[in-house]
Image (cartoon, rainbow, N blue to C red):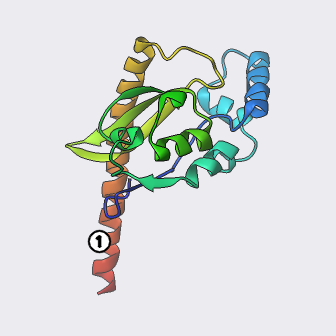
Amino acid sequence: KDPEEGRITGHCAIGPGDDREADRIWRELAEQEPWLDLRELVRRGLAGTPEEAPLAQRLRGLSFSGQEAGSRFSRALYELQELHGEQLEHTADRALVATLDLQHFVTLPLVRAERSLGFLLVDNRYSGVSLAPERIDVLQVLVRFATGILENLLLRESLERSLARSQAS
């Protein structure tokens, strides 16, 4: 989330970009040794770097206002939500659902000390695995860790900019 403009822009995505890529990844995973770690699975599962993956490219092209009255995606900045794409009525929400081809999904806010850093969106489009409450609980724990890491990265960037400015003057 850009705090100055109040806009939300896509930043990072992990996962297949379409049905064909999902099928390929699931087939390859079924053939893999069970001992492979996550890094190796990602390396084998994506063509090129994660930043070049079709889903990541599509997500980085997104930008929308975080202050749209009535938008469920604007509420995602502060509120955990379980949503169904076909039930969303706000124009901006419907556009995002269409762009990302979302059906059943969950938004988890990345909030630290009343400051929204954005949100994580998790869907089950390709896995078909139910977004059961237990899975959402696990995601909330992961989001807490991710929020702390993201906040530390933002603080580091801010310190580096301040240091660069002080050295330049």
Q: Position of residue 153 (x, y in %)?
A: 37, 52
Q: Local crowd at mark 1 within 10 Å, few (<14), some, or many (≥20)? A: few
Q: Position of residue 96 (x, y in %)?
A: 54, 44
Q: Using residue 36 as the reference point, say whether residue 88 is left or right of it.
A: left
Q: Nearer the viewer, residue 168 or 122?
A: 122
Q: Position of residue 113 (x, y in %)?
A: 20, 43
Q: Secondary structure beneath disc 1?
A: helix
Q: Is residue 166 above or below residue 13?
A: below
Q: Is residue 46 above or below residue 82?
A: below
Quarter residue 164 falls in: bottom left
Q: Residue furthest bottom?
A: 169
Q: Residue furthest left?
A: 113
The residue depicted at 25 percent of the width and 42 percent of the height is 112
Q: Nearer the viewer, residue 82 or 70?
A: 70
Amino acid type at circle 1 is Ser
Q: Which residue is mark 1?
A: 162
The residue depicted at 61 percent of the width and 46 percent of the height is 56
Q: Position of residue 109 (x, y in %)?
A: 35, 37
Quarter residue 162 falls in: bottom left
**Placement of the C terminus among the 4 image quadrants:** bottom left
Total tally of numbered discs in the picture = 1
